[in-house]
Image: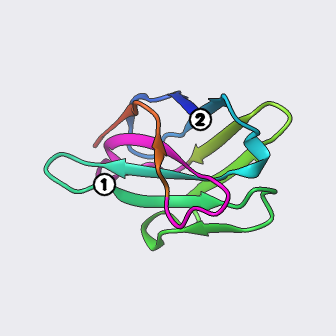
Amino acid sequence: QVQLVESGGGLVQAGDSLRLSCAASGVTFSDYAMGWFRQGPGKEREIVATISQTGSRTYYVNAVKGRFTISRDNAKNTMYLQMDSLKPEDSAIYYCGARGPHQADFRSWGQGTQVTVSS
């Protein structure tokens, strides 16, 4: 069972940057594809970005392309989300998710970290 702990959220102004971290434990981290998701007030959880086990493949939702960068350090069992040029519409609880070998979807989640962007 993978345990995930997010950190790095906070209150920033529009145009600022934040870097989120997701520390994983309990499994072989490099076996897992990872992703960042977010849930805004009154909205459903949506995908933000994903990264393959080795980091060679990434995906971004259109709304964050060119502003956010997902990365991972398998030696540190940690995934990151660098968020630049933040906008108020980026405000949400950000969750990291893990998809294990032979799994079709993300099934393990952290507790989330709040990101609030003021205008």
Mark 1 residue type: Arg
Point out residue 44 in the picture as x, y percentages from the top left corner: 23, 57
By what rule are the colours in the image chosen?
A: rainbow
Read off the residue under disc 1. 45
- Considering the image in quadrants, where does the N terminus appear? top right
Point out residue 45 in the picture as x, y percentages from the top left corner: 31, 54
User: Which residues, given as a range, are shown in magenta?
Assistant: 84-105
How many marks overall?
Answer: 2
Q: Image point 28% across, 43% down: which residue?
A: 119
The nearer-to-camera label among 1 and 2 is: 2
Viewer-nearest residue: 85 or 27: 27
The numbered disc on residue 2 is: 2
The numbered disc on residue 25 is: none
Q: Is residue 17 left or right of residue 80?
A: left
Q: Residues within 10 Å of mark 2 (few under 14, many from 20)?
A: some
Point out residue 90 in the picture as x, y percentages from the top left corner: 36, 50
Viewer-nearest residue: 1 or 113: 1
Q: Is residue 42 left or right of residue 87?
A: left
Mark 2 residue type: Val
Mark 1 and mark 2: Cα distance apart in space = 20 Å
Q: Image point 63% across, 29% down: which residue?
A: 23
Q: Residues within 10 Å of mark 1 (few under 14, many from 20)?
A: some
Q: Image point 74% across, 45% down: which residue?
A: 72
Asked if the residue under mark 2 is in contact with the one under mark 1, i.e. CB atoms within 8 Å, the reply is no
Q: Residue furthest left?
A: 42
Q: Is residue 107 above or below residue 67?
A: above
In which quadrant of the rendered view does residue 81 lie?
Answer: top right
Say if the magenta span includes residue 104.
yes
